[in-house]
Each structure stands twice: as C-alpha cells, then as structure tokens.
Image (cartoon, grey):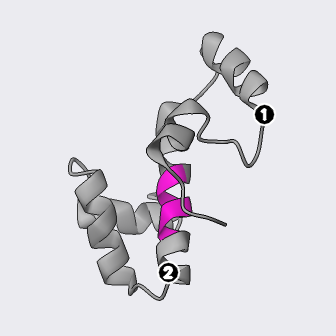
Amino acid sequence: MGNLTEAQISKNPLSDLISDDVYTLLESKGLINEKSVRDYIIRRKFKELRANKVSASLAIDKLREEYPYLQFDTIRKIVYHIQNK
C-alpha cells in the first residue's frame, strides 16, 4: 500500500473497498457514516505507519496531530478496535 494523499482520501476514502461512483451515490443518499469512515482512515494510516517501523505510541501521536480533537486513548481504542460495553 502506498502513501495516501489527502485528495485521494477526501474524494473517496473507501477507494480500496468501493468505486468512486458507489461512494458518491451512497454519500448523496446520506448512507455514509462519517465517524466510521474516519475511524477506518485512522486504522489504515496507523497500519501504514507501523509497517514503516514507527512505534505504536509515536504512530498514535502522529495521528493526534491530524486529529487534534481526539485524545490519545480514543485513537488507541480506534486502532485496536476496543469497544466500550
């Protein structure tokens, strides 16, 4: 997986799963859960950072720079799929 540009992510952040046309259609019908898409992007970026030998803690810190409104623990829960019950 290559590095993702912001333009690629903002156009269709699910391009590795669905086509641009399908994404546009789903988005126009209000069927895209933005929080779930954000979490998917965060997990994808985390995996990319880890594949490049970045420590888990540093990878989460880098993601916090991109998503300053999320706390360290929140990103940790996203990347490790930890769910509150």
Q: Is residue 22 above or below residue 55?
A: above
Name the quarter where the N terminus is drawn: bottom right
Q: Residue at x 21, y 51 (%)?
A: 68
Q: Nearer the viewer, residue 9 or 42?
A: 9
Local crowd at mark 2 within 10 Å, few (<14), some, or many (≥20)?
some
Choose top left, top right, bottom left or bottom right for residue 47: bottom right
**Left/right of residue 71 with respect to residue 23 in the rendered view:** left
Q: Is residue 47 above or below residue 42?
A: below
Say which mark, if any, is on residue 38.
none
Sequence-wise first label, 2 or 1:
1
Q: Which residue is mark 1?
A: 19
What predominant SS class does the magenta segment belong to? Answer: helix
Q: Amino acid at mark 1?
A: Ser
Q: Percent x, y for residue 16?
A: 73, 49
SS class of the residue under badge 1?
loop
Choose top left, top right, bottom left or bottom right for residue 17: top right
Q: Percent x, y for residue 79?
A: 48, 66
**Left/right of residue 32 with respect to residue 83 in the rendered view:** right
Q: Residue at x 26, y 70 (%)?
A: 61
**Left/right of residue 59 with respect to residue 23 in the rendered view:** left
Q: Amino acid at mark 2?
A: Arg
Magenta range: 41-46
Q: Nearer the viewer, residue 77 or 50?
A: 50
What is the C-alpha distance between the residues marked 2 and 1? 27 Å
Q: Percent x, y for residue 52?
A: 50, 83
Q: Which residue is mark 2?
A: 50
Q: Is residue 31 above or below residue 10?
A: above
SS class of the residue under badge 2?
helix
Q: Is residue 82 visible?
A: no
Q: Is residue 22 visible?
A: yes
